[in-house]
Amino acid sequence: MAGTLAACGSSGGDQGSGDSKTVTLVSHDSWAASKDVIAAFEKQSGYKVDVLEDGDAGQAVNKAILTKDNPQGDVFFGVDNTLLSRALDNGLFQPYEAKGSDRIKAEYRADQGKHRVTPVDTGDICVNYDKKYFADHKLEPPKSFDDLVKPQYKNLLVTENASASSPGLGFLLGTAAKYGDDGWQGYWKKLKANGVKVVDGWEQAYNEEFSGSAGGKKAKGDRPLVVSYASSPPVEVVYADPKPGAAPTGVAQGTCFRQVEYAGLLSNAENTKGGKAFLDFLISERFQEDMPLNMFVYPVREGAQVPPEFVKFGPQAKDPETMDPAKIADHRDQWVKSWTSLVLK
C-alpha cells in the first residue's frame, strides 16, 4: 500500500535541534484518533502532529527498520508483540519511560529494563463469521481452531499472509501456541486441504473477501470466515446507518490470539522532545478512552473506561492463546519460512 501523509500543520524551527514544532508519527493504516483529542494535545504541548500511515503493520515495521538511520518521523506506533523483537533487535527505538507508565496494566508491559517501547493498546486476533451466511445455510459457525479443518467449513476461510500481515502472523502464532512446535504444521496442512484462502493484508481480507463486512458485501466477498479481531463486530454496528440492534458478525472465541501494540521514540528522531510528549499523550486517560471507537482496540491504562457498544458487541476473548515474546523472537522467522513453503507453494 502507498503511504499517505496527513499533515495537520507545517514544520518550523531548526529540524536538527530537536526543537521542531511538528511531531511526526509513523504508523500503520489503522491509526485513528478524534480531531478534538489531537487538537487538545497540540494546544497543550505546542506541537503540531503529522501522521504518516505506511501500510499494514508488518509492512510499516519493516519499512521503519530499513529507514532507521534517516527515519520518516519521530514516533512509531503499531509494532505489536508478534514483531517486537525484530524492532528491538534492529535498534529501532531509543529508551524513554513515558509519564504515566506506572498506570499501565502489568500484563501488557514489555522491555521493562530499557523502556524502549510503551504499550498503547491490546486486542485479540480471532476468526470472525458472517451470521447471515451460517443462518441461511443452517450451519453452526465454527467455535475453535479444530472446527476450521472440518469438511463443513471447506473453502469458507480467508486469512492474511503471515510474512507480511500482523493479523496473519498472529493467527499463525495462535495455531503454534495451540498445537505446539510439532503440531502446527500438520494443522496448516489440514487447513490448506480444507481450502483456506490467503491474501496479502487485512484490508483485502476483511473489506473485499469477507461476506459479513459492509465493505465485503459491496465487493461481493464470498468467504464467510475471516481472520480479523474480536473487536471487529462493533465496527459493523457503529458505522451502520441505521444501527442494528445486534452485530451482523460474530467471533469464534476458540481461535483468538492476544496482541499488544506498542509505540516508541525512533532512534534517530529529529524532534525527541516532541516525540516524548506524544508518547506521554498516547497513554494519557483522554487518549486511552478515545481510542476504542477509533481504532477498535482496548486500552492498556488501568481505570480507562470502555464505551458500552464495545463491551456489548466486542468483548475481549475470555481465554485467548498467548505466547512469551522471547519464544516468538526465537521461532518467528523460521515458523514464517516454514508456513510460506507449506501454505503458499
Image (cartoon, rainbow, N blue to C red):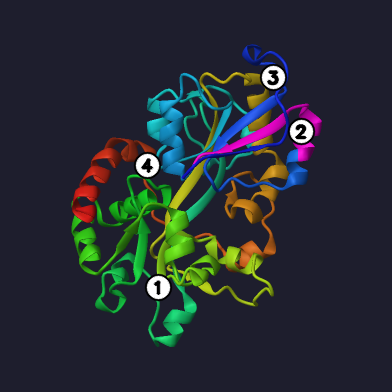
Is disc 1 surrounded by few (<14), some (14 to 19) or many (20+) residues within 10 Å? some
Q: In this view, does 157 lie above or below 322?
A: below
Three-letter code for the amino acid on which mark 1 is drawn: Asp
Q: Is residue 145 found left or right of 274 in the rendered image?
A: left
For the point 24% across and 50% down, which residue is it?
339
Q: Name the N-terminal-most of marks 3 and 1.
A: 3
Total numbered labels: 4
Q: What element carries label 3?
A: loop
Q: Where in the figure is residue 324, as x and y percent of width and height?
A: 37, 42
Which mark, by number, is residue 42? 2
Which mark, by number, is residue 20? 3
Q: Where in the figure is residue 336, as x and y percent of width and height?
A: 27, 45
Q: Name the N-terminal-most of marks 4 and 1.
A: 1
Is disc 3 surrounded by few (<14), some (14 to 19) or many (20+) residues within 10 Å? some
User: Which numbered disc, 3 or 2, marks the residue closer to the eye?
Assistant: 3
Name the one closer to the observer, 81 or 216.
216
| Stretch in magenta | 39-54
Name the one closer to the observer, 288 or 337.
337
For the point 51% across and 37% down, which residue is it?
109
- Give the residue pinned by disc 4: 324
Separation of marks 3 and 2 at Cα, in angstroms: 13 Å
Q: Name the N-terminal-most of marks 2 and 4.
A: 2
User: Which numbered disc, 3 or 4, marks the residue closer to the eye?
Assistant: 3
Name the one closer to the observer, 326 or 278.
278
Separation of marks 1 and 2 at Cα, in angstroms: 44 Å
Three-letter code for the amino acid on which mark 2 is drawn: Glu
Separation of marks 3 and 4 at Cα, in angstroms: 38 Å
Q: Name the N-terminal-most of marks 1 and 2.
A: 2
Is disc 4 surrounded by few (<14), some (14 to 19) or many (20+) residues within 10 Å? few
Which mark, by number, is residue 222? 1
Q: Is residue 234 magenta?
A: no
Three-letter code for the amino acid on which mark 3 is drawn: Ser
